[in-house]
Amino acid sequence: MGIVKISDLMHENLRLASNALSRSVNAQAEHWMKIGMLAEIYPDLNHQQLTRLLMRVERDGGAELAQLLDHSVFTPQGIAQ
């Protein structure tokens, strides 16, 4: 585990979102990082498709970045619209 420095404003945004969504601050930050990472890898997917991809990856035991970049393993075509 590492330490990531963020601005006070971002921390406040995380705190508000984590309370609203019943997540810890760390879990909310990790969720936003996952969504952002997937949005950069798959810019053609919308938020709903990215969420479905995250759920599929989690169901299959999680994934490292190297696996997410392997399009033969996680193809956007396999994600329901």
Image (cartoon, grey):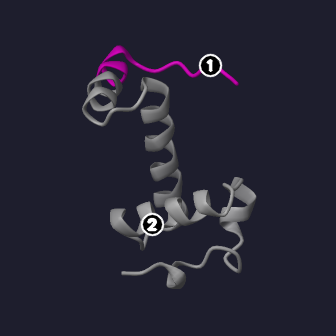
What amino acid is labelled 2 in the image?
Arg
Camera-side mark, 2 or 1? 2
Question: Would you name the residue on which mark 2 appears?
Answer: 52
| Residue 63 image position (x, y, % from top left) | 69, 56
Boundaries of the magenta span: 1-12
Q: Quadrant of residue 3?
A: top right
CA separation, marks 2 and 1? 28 Å
What amino acid is labelled 1 in the image?
Ile
**In the picture, which quadrant includes the C terminus?**
bottom left
**Nearer to us in this view, 60 or 30:** 60
Which residue does the image show at 50% across and 68% down from the upper left?
42
In the rendered view, does 18 fall on the left or right side of 35?
Answer: left
| Residue 18 image position (x, y, % from top left) | 34, 29
**Nearer to us in this view, 69 or 55:** 55
Q: Is residue 51 above or below residue 26?
A: below
Which residue does the image show at 60% across and 61% down from the upper left?
59
